[in-house]
Image (tube, rainbow, N blue to C red):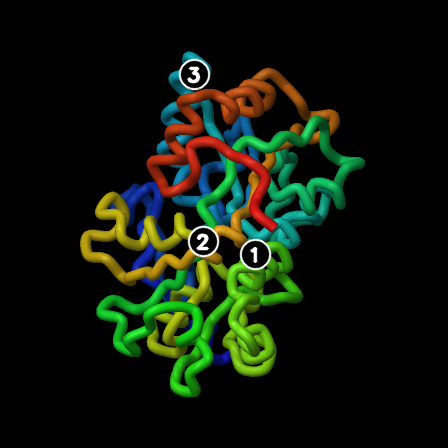
Amino acid sequence: MEEETLCLTLPWPLDTGRDSPNQIFLPGSNVVYDFHGDPLRAELTILMEGNQFMVIPDLLEAFYEYLGRRVEVFYATLPPPRFRGALFGEPLAVGNLLLTLEPQIVMAPPEFMKKVAEKILSPKTFMQNKGVVLVVKRGNPKGITGPSDLMREDVKIAISNPQTEVNSFNSYARALEHVPGLLEKIQKEALFSRLIHHREVPALVYAGKADVAPLYYHFAYYYQNPQFFENPLFEHLTFPEGKKGVSLYQVALVRGREDEVARAWYEFLSTREAQQTYARHGFELSYSQPQK
């Protein structure tokens, strides 16, 4: 698995574009997608659950209007276990680059917030996703029609790692557990991500290493959104049980760093403007407790 994922990627767009000044983006070497902005100039530093990365550029524009001015924002879009150490003063490492951050905001699922309760203030739910779909390569070469087809011997599954990304794996498992034997097949045969499934898993499908991946609906929406990709990369299939994989999104202030801009962001995420921005990127317009 490690050898197969090392060099697999998608033609991800960059927030700043590839023609920005002093661009040293080099596929295969200097590639950084999940750190956004300038940490030295930032007035607001956010650590956030990575699977909402596609929303943030538009969300920031709405925030500037809400705040009444533009501010420098640095944000990391990672699985929460990957940024937990940053809340305790540990650096985040990207190759030779070390970043010691002083975050003011954390955006993560309720399960994670409970684990770092001593470091945060006032976690609140502000959004939920639309659950789980099946993502297949454009053209659906294996003719997959639903979760039951994942039991076929010729179908290879890619999924988030149950050890390093517990929350997303559990969401996907809830959506698929109705198929007898499927979770057992996943444990024995699936291709697992290593650290960041929102980058690794779609790359496995795109490269033909896997045939299908359970992913949140907003990923599928993103892959087919001409704002980001001129030509759709994948197709997706919905199924009723996918709603069992709905997950909640929370925001919290970091203790001792809750300044005016951080509090403004915290309050902004509950506004209609923020909710509608998320909805435009494939999230629910309002949230409720996920189905059990």
Q: Which residue is mark 1?
A: 171
Q: Quadrant of residue 109?
A: top right
**Residue 288 picture location, percent across and down:** 55, 35
Is 252 placed above or below 239 here? above
Mark 2 and mark 1: Cα distance apart in space? 9 Å
**Residue at 63% in and 19% down:** 259
* Three-letter code for the amino acid on which mark 2 is drawn: Tyr
199 left or right, relative to 112:
left
Q: Nearer the viewer, residue 141 or 66?
A: 141
Secondary structure state at the residue bearing disc 3: helix
Which sits earlier in the primary sequence, circle 3 or circle 2?
Answer: 3
Label located before the other in sequence (2 or 1): 1
Q: First in sequence, mark 1 or 3: give its number.
A: 3
Mark sitting on residue 63:
none
The reply to whether callout 2 and callout 1 are in contact (CB within 8 Å) is yes
Q: Nearer the viewer, mark 3 or mark 2?
A: 2
Residue type indicated by callout 3: Tyr
Residue that carries the numbered disc 2 in the rendered image: 216
Name the residue furthest bottom: 153
Measuring 63% from the left and 54% from the top, which residue is drawn there? 82
Residue 15 visible in the shown view: yes
Mark 3, other Cα within 10 Å: few <14 / some 14–19 / many ≥20: some
Q: Which mark is residue 66?
A: 3
Residue 96 visible? The answer is: no
- Mark 1 vs 3: CB contact within 8 A: no
Q: Residues within 10 Å of mark 1 (few under 14, many from 20)?
A: many
